[in-house]
Image (cartoon, rainbow, N blue to C red):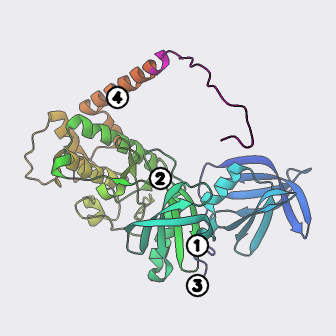
Amino acid sequence: MDNFFDSSFYDVETGITLKKQIAFLKVRTNHFVRCQLQLVNTILTLNYFEEETEILNSINIANAYIEFNDHVCMGRGVKIQQQNKELLIFGLTSQLKQILKLYGIQKDFANQYRVLKQIGSGSFGKVYKVKNVQNEQQFAVKMFEKQLLLDPRDKSAIKKEIQILRLMDHPNVLTIKECYESDQCVFLVEELFETQMEISQDRILKEDKAISLLLKLLNGLEYIHTKNIIHRDLKPNNILFRNLEDPVIADFGLADFYRPDGTYLFQKCGTRNYVAPEIITTNNYDYKVDIYSLGVVFHQLLTAQIPRPWDNYQRSPDCQALLTGMLNSNPRNRLSIQEIRQNKLVRRIQRRSQIFDAMGSLSDAAKPVVNSPPKQTKPFSLHSA
């Protein structure tokens, strides 16, 4: 089957800047040129070592096929293939190797990971818990089966999901580690979280606790929006937990870069009961669609119910004002993230959290240093028990 990512490189502001790292470019058999390596966003440039302004070669690493290999003399190396161009570079730093893993496509998944068990499934594939064979770390891998991607838009959606996830770097947002491809599948290696948000009558939260959770989700959502991305599918199933206290926004399968003209890959999308009204009624919508969806989740945390016009739950006035503002059917009147933070109840919870954090820091600083007696150790012996 054809390579899934052929000719699908892209230009996007990543914030990556690596400058003037010494590297060695292989130009012919057993001949290497010493050069200055620079990486700005996803464009890797190699300049002559003596003449730094003279470009020797360059390549876009976004969706380039990469293969790592070591040279006995030149050190850590990588072969980068993008369309008809191929570069073989040695002298990689560990930082550059991690960036190449993040933005490139590798082909040796079966040699790098061992599948432990299936933990989920979707329209085009399955999710597995895996273990890295080198360092024993565990991850989640989202596996897409190529033969199921019959609609070209589905292929574009997967590529866009990977592109978006590569930009994520926040404690309340899912991050991607690397991407692989085989003849049959595309593998997306992500952080592993085994706890998902569950909504039920026996898990109803009090207002203070629900708002503490809401604030952390707002932090993640605000970060997503600063990258000019709309999630468009916020719901309990797409909220995981790093631990019992820290929620993580996941599943960017319907996410897209914000466009004022409303021309998205999928314009009318989302999950019933969580989708904002304007997504269904108009093509022109903005980041506030995520506020509506988050408002539904917040309502569920308090009641275990989808919000309905006839709701008659007992809430404090400030909490009711927050819910009404987040769930306003008119996006012009719907609260923004900044306006949510100005709610009196939200501000009180946030101040209390800041005080507790400060008290915890002071408590840690005030702990006495205990000098434990030195341990008695035996002299080293090759045959000691």
Give, as a single range, the part of the protein colored magenta: 364-385
Q: Is mark 4 on a helix, strand or loop?
A: helix
Q: Quadrant of residue 209?
A: top left
Q: Which residue is drawn at 49% across and 72% down?
A: 156
Kind of residue at disc 2: Asn
234 sits left or right of 160 in the view: left
First along the sequence among labels 2 and 4: 2
Question: What residue do we see at 27% from left, 52% from top?
Answer: 292
Q: Nearer the viewer, mark 2 or mark 4?
A: 4
Tell me the quadrant of the picture where the C terminus can be found.
top right
Q: Position of residue 252 (x, y in %)?
A: 42, 60
Tell me residue 203's x, y (percent): 20, 47
Disc marking residue 181: 1
Give the secondary structure at mark 3: loop
Mark 2 or 3, closer to the camera? 3
Dot 1 amino acid type: Glu
Q: Is mark 1 on a helix, strand or loop?
A: strand
In front: label 1 or label 2: 1
Whole-angstrom CA distance, mark 2 to mark 4, is 29 Å
Task: Give the spatial CA distance, label 4 vs label 3.
Answer: 54 Å
The residue nearer to you, when weighing 272 against 370, is 370
Q: How crowded is mark 3: few (under 14 residues within 10 Å), some or many (20 or more)?
A: few
Report the residue marked by disc 3: 1
Residue occupied by mark 4: 353
Does the CB distance between marks 1 and 3 fall below 8 Å? Answer: no
Q: Main secondary structure of the magenta part?
A: loop
Rounded to the nearest angstrom, the CA distance separating label 4 from label 1 is 44 Å
Going from the N terminus, do you reach mark 4 or mark 1 first?
Answer: 1
Which tag, 1 or 2, sits closer to the chain's start?
1
Disc 2/disc 3 C-alpha distance (Å): 34 Å
Residue 382 highlighted magenta (yes or no): yes
| Mark-to-mark CA distance, 1 and 2 | 28 Å
